[in-house]
Every structure is written in structure tokens, then in C-alpha cells.
Image (tube, rainbow, N blue to C red):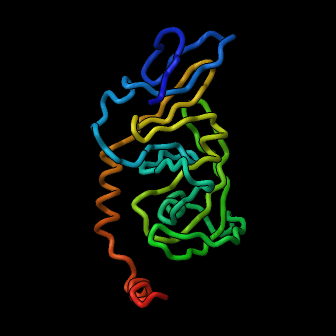
Amino acid sequence: MFVARLPVGDFGQGSKRVRPDTQPVLGFSDEDKIRTIQPHDDALVITLRIGGYDVKRVMVDQGSTIEIMYSDLYKGLNLKPDDLTPYNSPLVSFEGRVVTPKGQIRLPVQTGSEVVEVNFIIVDVYSPYTAIVAKPWLHTLGAVSSTLHQKVKYPSEWQVCEIRGDQSAARQCLVAVIQHKPETKFLAKAERGL
């Protein structure tokens, strides 16, 4: 169980104010489950402001060490190949295949008044998500996330602010993954053990 010790009163939706001489303590309690569907095993899917645009279907993956941007979002943000810097390490997709990234790009990610520069690795594979944010974003923001509570909490100007997850979007993404038909060539190789 996560324990929340949030001093002093509530100052609006999504924030708790603390005295300037006190560090806000980030945590979760059963109260944070209010307005969530329980029990569940949904991914934490949020909306973030990336590169000046509100981007939906961003998955928070606290187990990953790299941030991913899928090519649909890359194209939707009108980014060009000239905007990318090389990224030479191959990645493994959710389907288990090796993916060669198109490159990487550094973009601002805004949450409330906080702005964090994030290095996104651009990949051209199917995903119902537009992007994945991971430990580097969480750590730079000073945030903690909870899939159980469907929230990300972070300190900002002596407050604890929060981003709520979208369980409906998470479930739509799960259905899309289940319905997605992987490439025939990849399936044939996998069945032959290649």
C-alpha cells in the first residue's frame, strides 16, 4: 500500500499546497482510487503536452529506461528526418521483433507549469499508443506513478500535482493490440523458430 502524507489543505483539483519550508511528500492512498474502475489491470495512459501539442494515448512505463515516439505522432507533429539525430541501438518491439530506430529527437514535455526536455527514440512499428514515457521523464520531473491508482504525481511550486490516467483509452489500446494482425512474414518466421 502506498502512504500519502500531504500536508495542509487542498488548493484545487489535482494539487495539494504545502508550506515553502516543507518538502511535499509524494504517495498514494485509497482516496486516490476514487473515480477509477476497480479492480483492474489497466496500463497508465495519459495525455501530455509534447512539442507544444496535447498528445493523447501516452503510456507511462516506469519499467523502461527509454522514451519512445511512434511514427504516427512523429508525422503528426510535422517533424522531418532532418530534425532527428542518429540512434544506433536496436530495440525489441512488444511483438518480439528487433526494430531499428529512425533516430531520436529532443522535445519539451509540459505538465502544468513544469517543462522537461525528453529524448524520444522514433520507431516505425505498430502501436495503439502515440508515445511511451519512462524512468528518465519520471525522474527528471521528480514524479511517481501508480497504475493501481491511475495517476502520476509530481512536486511543483510547493504543491503535489497529479495527472489522471484515462482507463477508457487504456482499454481501447488493449483491444487494438489484441485485434492487430502482426505482419505475415514475421509470423511465418516465428512459427519456424527463426
Residue 92 rendering spot, x and y as whole percentages: 55, 70
Q: Indicate whether 2 appears above or below 173.
A: above
Q: Quadrant of residue 26?
A: top right
Q: Quadrant of the N terminus?
A: top left
Q: Nearer the viewer, residue 100 or 149?
A: 149
Q: Indicate whether 18 appears above or below 129.
A: above
Question: Which residue appears at 50% of the width and 69% of the height?
Answer: 93
Q: Nearer the viewer, residue 67 or 49?
A: 67
Residue 134 rendering spot, x and y as whole percentages: 57, 49
Question: Which residue appears at 33% of the width and 43% of the height?
Answer: 167
Q: Indicate whether 102 appears above or below 187.
A: above
Q: How many marks?
A: 0
Q: Indicate whether 94 appears above or below 118.
A: below
Question: Which residue appears at 32% of the width and 62% of the height?
Answer: 176
Residue 29 rendering spot, x and y as whole percentages: 42, 25
Question: Which residue appears at 58% of the width and 35% of the height?
Answer: 143
Q: Is residue 178 left or right of residue 88?
A: left
Q: Quadrant of residue 187?
A: bottom left
Q: Is residue 127 left or right of residue 161?
A: left
Residue that sits furthest to the front in the current view: 1
Residue 186 rendering spot, x and y as whole percentages: 43, 84
